[in-house]
Image (cartoon, rainbow, N blue to C red):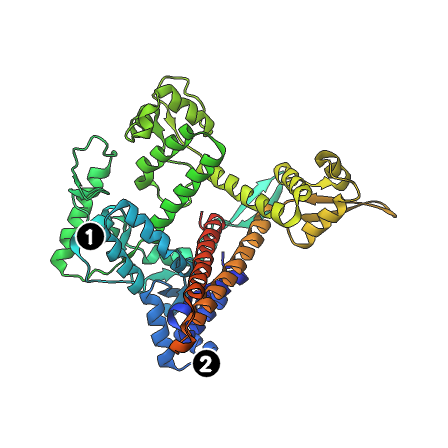
Amino acid sequence: MATPYGIKLAVHLITNHFGTLVAKVCDNLLRRGPLTLQQVIRYTELTPQQVKNSLLILIQHNCVQAFTLESQGGFGDGPKANTQYLALFSNILHRMRFPKFLEIVSRELDQECKELLEGLLQNGCREDVVREGLTKLLAAHFVECCPAPEPLVPEQVKVETTSKKRGTKSAKINEESETIEQRVLAAAGPMEAQRFSMITNTEFDVNGETSTDDSPSLIVGEKRKRDSLELDRESTAEEGEVVLWRANFEEFLRRLRHMACIENVRASLDDGAVKVLKAKLDATRGLEKKVKTEKSVPLSLDNIFEEVIKSEEGRVMTLDDVRASLVQLGCPASARGTADSYSIDLKKIIESAQNDEVESIVLKRYGRDAYRIFRLLSKNGRLVETDKISDTTFVEKKDAPKILYKMWKDEYLHMEKLVLAPNRNILLWKVNKRPLWEHVLDEMFHAALNLSLRAAYEWDKEKEVINPLEAMTKEERQKQKNIRILLDSSLLKLDDAIMLFHNF
């Protein structure tokens, strides 16, 4: 969700990377939604050439997607179409995650692949890439072919349904309607077989070695996928089409989400649960259809055990150990031997991590008593009166209303007034998670913006030292370097929390 401070942070990132003119175009697209070229020119008051150049830069770096919205004309008219430009808020934020993406590739592949990815991240889309390195990146889904430059998106028709209940008739709009961004990206994205079309039947694993279709760990259906990909690759080569490549942000987010799940489990459960979760996610990652997968792909107990013992640390576990860890992870114990499939609730793990993050903020900002009150209301999920809150959390009755009012004023609590008599009211309190999560995310965007501005200020201050006689001493330079390192590491850590609420 693009919150007010989220938009300011995105514009700041674009300003740092591409300058004020490009940022002005991006700002208008983020705040106003999809716009035509003439609308962008009118709102920005820039020249047509400045706007065109700015849009080309943003498209090149995957920050804007052009599309043609097809709409029906009046009576007797045919379809009408016009090109519009949509800012991709999440893709813009990914620019501050490039170090994380490079670290993942550095850990799983080799230096050549890291350098190739770095070039893609710096240049946006590229055609001239090293084939061997590209093959490895495609095999790991770290790189994909670029989307269609200007897909045709049909006008969305809202579907109304009527239902009868207890003799009454009600109409409702389909709540599952896709957003314009989802529709545009779906129309622009290539078919799954084309995204990684250079993958052949002989693939590179993460160590640069090859694996064949006869591998015992090959997931059912992968061979058919690879055959389809090979045919598609040959067809593309015959047609002589130019294929542009870009970093696949979706895959990096999937890896980071899995890492977040593992770290959350590590903080609350034992090492066995961590090993089982990691092995299961590694084995089924390629079968996940979207980043926000609610439950992991089902696997039998035997298959999970086989994946666990592939690692050195997993070989100390027995089948009973794996079964016990699955129970800890919320999977019910198998009652019929080892044939049942097990699926782990990833959504529940992420929600637990979100709760922990907000509770940590409340503890730091408002203190221990407020933490106990917030935790009670968060777990309760319904309205609770002030006196009952005080009694349950053992907070002094004179202090509880002050703490509750403070958190309500800062938009961390929802309050309702119940009138019992003309001169007697009681206050009821509740945690509304959805609006609260959005508020917390906006606060995080604000903090990230402040950190980024401070880091830019420190960097500019160091560059201002031109005269050697005015140069900083060795101690001053080290201090300046330490400040930048602290700011950068703080920003990366804060971004982990941002992804938890925005991307996961």
- Residue at 37%, 23% in the rendered image: 340
Q: Earlier in the sequence, mark 2 or mark 1?
A: 2
Which mark is in front, 2 or 1? 1
| Circle 2: residue type | Glu
Q: Nearer the viewer, residue 155 or 280?
A: 280
The residue labelled by disc 1 is: 133
Query: Eyeballing the image, is 373 above or below 111?
Result: above
Please state if 399 lies on the left or on the right of 352 as rendered. right
The residue labelled by disc 2 is: 45
Please state if 307 lies on the left or on the right of 356 as rendered. left
Q: Where is residue 101 in the image (x, y as percent from the top left)?
A: 34, 52
Q: Position of residue 85 (x, y in %)?
A: 39, 68
Assign a secondary structure to mark 2. Answer: loop
- Residue at 31%, 23% in the rendered image: 302
Question: Mark 2, residues whose alpha carbon is within 10 Å: few (<14), some, or many (≥20)?
Answer: few
- Residue at 27%, 51% in the rendered image: 191
Assign a secondary structure to mark 1. Answer: helix
Alpha carbon distance from label 2 to label 1: 44 Å
Residue found at the far bottom of this picture: 47
Q: Nearer the viewer, residue 132 or 293?
A: 132
Residue found at the far right of this picture: 423
Res. 15 visible in picture: no
Question: Mark 1, residues whose alpha carbon is within 10 Å: few (<14), some, or many (≥20)?
Answer: many
| Circle 1: residue type | Gly
Q: Residue 195 carries which label?
A: none
> Toward which corner of the image does residue 90 lie, by quadrant?
bottom left
